[in-house]
Amino acid sequence: MNQITRNNYEEYILEYADNALSVDLMQEMESFLNLHPDIAAEVLSFRNIKLTPDPATAFEGKEDLLRPTESKTSSLSSSLLKVVAVGVILSGIGLFIYLSETTDVINSHSRVNVKQSATQREVESHRGQVDHTTKIKGDQLDNHTISPQDLRIASNTSTDTQSETQVDPSSHDDLHIQTVEAPQMTQGKQAQQVTQPILTGPIYQPSAPHQRQGVSVQSQDEGDRSTGPQPNVSPQVFASEGSSIRTQEQQIQQLATIESLPLTDQLSSLMIQSDEITIPDLIASKRGGSILKSIIKSTGLSREIIVDISESLRPSFALAEVQLVPTYLKENQIALQRK
Amino acid sequence: MLSTAEYNTIIKLYADNLYRHALKVNGDAVLAQDVVQNVFLKLWQMRATIKVESVKALLYKMTYQQGIDLYRSEKSRKARQTVIPDQSHDTASQYGSKDLLERAFKSLAPEAKHLILLRDYEGYSYAEISDLVGQPLSSVKVNLYRARKKMQHQLSTLENEVK
């Protein structure tokens, strides 16, 4: 323990005045002060000297120093917005997966329609520039009006398909398309010949492969994967027979209860009851006006075009395909306009 | 890391105290306002590296440094000007004991004022003051004792003048 002297007493004297010294130091300080009464007098004199703040003295520019912050409401909104955004993204992913699965099946049936549209677009973009060297083989398809007008196109845009569409410039009135044997077959399939036509004309081939009216339908993709010969089924069967499952009057009655729903929900509700529906049936109904408005709003197409497409092609849709109605109409718009 | 909300809360909590502290040390309201504004401006600029729990000590440390710097520059400026004698002593009789204490306090050097204010206004321990001002603990105790001793001497002088 340090000895308290005149040289170091200043280190201890404040704590002595505050009664903050240890017992040993307190005793030593008292002994020291007894020996030095002048210092003891100092301690007594400043023991009561203590400054106290004046609360009335305030900084006037305090508000100017504050920084703008997000309010609780906006902070809550921000958090809520994040949650909603995550929900929307997840919903989008789910919808994308659902649509992908549905579209894959439909595309396998309607690949020809897509190829036809691509071919037509290519014809338009390359009009006057394409070499006229391709010839057309195969059966003539009804209602196809792509008129290449002396153009010949080798449709090789889809490299994954195992067939090739060729257009004969000699035909100026109708489009003739034939499925030719694929140049390369997968291993083990050399002996297989794809006999299903890949261009089916104006008929929309609906739905996933399933049994309808006793006819087994198999997609081209499935045909590629299978080993046996595939049935050659005209999709016209679906369009004509699918819409006959329920009468138009029954569908009209159902429309009365689903009129206010969006297009998809309207059609879905009908599908639940009728299994299959055609757009012309919907448009022709008493409630067809509102449905047509929904279709126009969804597709951006004019009323005339939608009616023309629906009447001339008479597409039928099953429940799982309802959301493809706008896409179908848009894809067939060019074909109809050229017709 | 200080958030904006925390920064604003700190202003509301400490701005008045810092202003009183700066005003006591510098004795000039305008200078004290400048000190406080500069301190909080620096705090905002440093907010990314500051912890909330160490803010108060940092504020007083910056206030002390700002006050010392401004005091010295102001003292230098005033030294070049004509000195006007303080006439307040002529009316010393109107002061009470608290006023005399305030006048005794004003006679101290800014460093000594700062130490006394940290102890009396803010209630910091000697060890905490030692950390704040960057001086050894023994030096803080000695300097504080000498500041109080000088204050007491000045107070006795003022009381004798009043009598």
Image (cartoon, coloured by chain):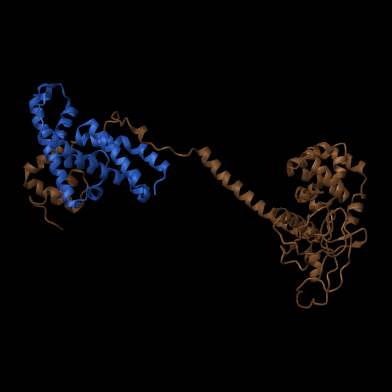
Chain colours: A brown, B blue
- B124 left or right of A226? left
- Residue occupying the point 20% across, 39% down: B70
Q: In the image, residue A86 lies at what x, y percent?
A: 60, 50
Any part of residue A262 in sight: no
Q: In this view, does B42 lie above or below A125?
A: above
* Occupied quadrant, residue B161: top left
- Residue occupying the point 78% across, 78% down: A188
Q: Is residue B8 above or below residue B159?
A: below
Q: In this view, does A239 lie above or below B36?
A: below
Q: In the image, residue A153 lies at what x, y percent?
A: 75, 61
Q: In the image, residue A96 lies at what x, y percent?
A: 69, 55
- Count of numbered marks: 0
Of residue B80 and residue A173, the one placed in the foreground of this image is A173
Q: Quadrant of the N terminus of chain A?
A: bottom left
Q: In the image, residue A25 lies at what x, y percent?
A: 17, 52
Any part of residue B26 in sight: yes
Of residue A296 and residue A255, the one placed in the foreground of this image is A296
Of residue A90 and residue A154, the one placed in the foreground of this image is A154
Q: Is residue A280 above or below residue A128?
A: above
